[in-house]
Amino acid sequence: NAGVTQTPKFQVLKTGQSMTLQCAQDMNHEYMSWYRQDPGMGLRLIHYSVGAGITDQGEVPNGYNVSRSTTEDFPLRLLSAAPSQTSVYFCASSYGRPGRVPYEQYFGPGTRLTVT
Amino acid sequence: AQSVTQLGSHVSVSEGALVLLRCNYSSSVPPYLFWYVQYPNQGLQLLLKYTTGATLVKGINGFEAEFKKSETSFHLTKPSAHMSDAAEYFCAVSQSFQGAQKLVFGQGTRLTINP
């Protein structure tokens, strides 16, 4: 199993550009999520999905869109990049339907994004 | 809403010394608690977790943590630090939100090991 994969590893954007960060998992996990990591702030949840076709907002969703058309893929779209979106982005996945004891979340290696 | 506070953004210990990383949580319901480790330029890896049962939880790489409800704490310890333990450590609590279980992370503690 490849686990959770993310592409690209690094990206530089100009303000106003759009792009999609890719995330895929091959563990048949129901739950997937996107976090951003900023110094001194830990990881903050952007969006999450509890299954194909179901997504919802996390703590910091503004400026980002997601969709979940398959169990395996959960892309994150930046609509119009801003310098405040400079961060490291992590995708994670786990088993677990709503209401059950949470399973371990598996994290991808991250995408380092710089917006100039 | 649940929250997590990690005391100390940087901790430095000598090789062979005790490692103690502090985590306090706020939760109105019995919490599920986690410690994750992040090595440089890598994603997060689960060290250990507390869900129910025994309050002393053992994890990988010789780490353990004790859930103390009266102190709302979940501190991470390792008796003898190794150079390979240098990393950033995150404490997290699982929060129910609109039917899903989400992780709420602390700010992280960077652990440095001195030779």
Image (cartoon, rainbow, N blue to C red):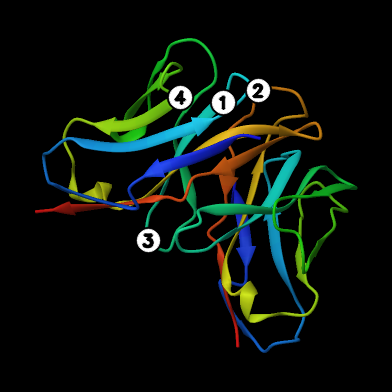
Report which quarter residue A6 is drawn in.
bottom right
Q: Position of residue B37 (x, y in %)?
A: 41, 46
Q: Is residue A25 left or right of residue B8?
A: right
Q: Nearer the viewer, residue B64 or A106?
A: B64
Q: Are marks 4 and 2 in contact (CB under 8 Å)?
A: no
Q: Position of residue A12 (x, y in %)?
A: 60, 84
Q: Name the amino acid, label 4.
A: Thr
* Callouts 3 and 4 on one subunit: yes
The subunit letter for the residue under badge 3 reads: B
Q: Are marks 2 and 1 in contact (CB under 8 Å)?
A: yes
Q: Is residue B66 left or right of residue A116?
A: left
Upstream in sequence: badge 3 or badge 1? 1
Residue that appears at 59% across and 42% down: B104
Residue that badge 1 annotates: B32
| Measured Cα–Cα span from mark 4 to mark 1 | 12 Å
On screen, residue A11 above or below B14: below
Q: Position of residue A53 (x, y in %)?
A: 90, 47
Residue that appears at 26% across and 36% down: B20
Q: Are marks 4 and 1 in contact (CB under 8 Å)?
A: no
Q: Name the amino acid, label 2.
A: Val
Residue that appears at 67% across and 89% down: A14
Crowdedness near tag 2: few (<14), some (14–19) or many (≥20) residues, C-alpha within 10 Å: some
Upstream in sequence: badge 3 or badge 4? 3
Q: Is residue B77 left or right of residue A71?
A: left
